[in-house]
Image: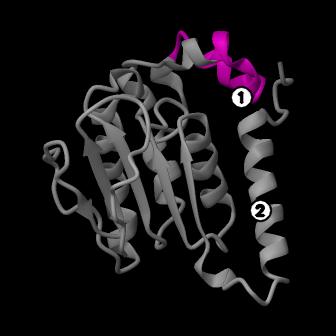
Amino acid sequence: MPGADEWGSIGAWAWGISRIVDYFETDKGVDAKRIAIVGVSRLGKTVLWAGAHDPRIAMVIASCSGEGGAALSRRNYGETIKHLAVRYGYQFAGNYAKYGDRVDQFPVDSHMLIALMAPRPVLLQTGDKDFWSDPKGEFLAAVAAEPVYKLLGKQGLGTDQIAAADQAILHDIGYVMHAGGHGAIPQIGVCF
């Protein structure tokens, strides 16, 4: 378990992604200005954190990232801060756990994390039956991040109505929900 202000594994893995980007910048066979990162579940949380911290990452695709990722913490639905702190405490700084029973006092929320990636594209992908990851909470976070994208001349979702499964919204903030559970689906074609 990390100390109060020490990195958890999510932060360490995100740092590792940035070290890979460091290498890509030296490799003439890689266009380091077009790096997209993809992660599912805890790695969905990781790619969001990496994208927020490293502006060299051109695009982030986070699948089923849930609590601590794209889902709004204050919804306190599905996976919660308390659950993560108890079961997966190694993923976050120790201070995260103190909000398990005080979610209403959590000083940040996931829409802020998404907004930190602006103006770069971000795609949130989830499953309509993945209630643990809170597809609606992920959608609402994308809606709440839209003003920052608009401020920077980019397009958010353009709606506050969640789309049906398999009805992708592919703007600078994208959202797509497949019919099914936890995990990415390979047949989604993404083009920004």
Residue 171 x, y percent position in the rendering: 29, 69
Is most of the magenta stretch helix, strand or loop?
helix
Residue type of the residue flagged with mark 1: Gln
Examine the image and state in which quarter residue 172 appears. Answer: bottom left
**38 w.r.t. 54: above or below:** above
Magenta-tinted stretch: 85-102
Q: Is residue 143 visible?
A: no
Residue 69's disc is: none
Residue at x 76%, y 45% (from the top left corner): 13
Query: In percent of the image, x 74 and y 87: which residue is there?
Result: 29
> What residue lies at 60% left-to-right and 51% top-to-bottom?
47
Measuring from the top left, give residue 166's x and y in whole percent.
19, 48
In x, y percent, where is residue 187?
34, 55
- CA distance for labels 2 and 1: 18 Å
Secondary structure state at the residue bearing disc 2: helix
The magenta stretch spans residue 95: yes
Residue contact at pointers 2 and 1, CB within 8 angstroms:
no
Location of the N terminus by quadrant is top right
In the picture, the quarter occupied by the C terminus is bottom left
Residue 132 drawn above or below residue 176? above
Q: Residue at x 49, y 72 (%)?
A: 120
Q: Position of residue 94 (x, y in %)?
A: 76, 22
In the picture of the structure, the residue carrying the numbered disc 1 is 91
> By what rule are the colours in the image chosen?
one colour
* Amino acid under disc 2: Ser
Please rate how many residues cluster around mark 1, counting C-alpha atoms within 10 Å: few if below 14, some from 14 to 19, many from 20.
many
Locate residue 136 relative to residue 185 in the image: left or right: left
Precedes in sequence: disc 2 or disc 1: 2
Return the residue at label 2. 18
Q: Is residue 62 left or right of residue 49?
A: left
Q: In the image, is residue 94 part of the stretch drawn in magenta?
A: yes
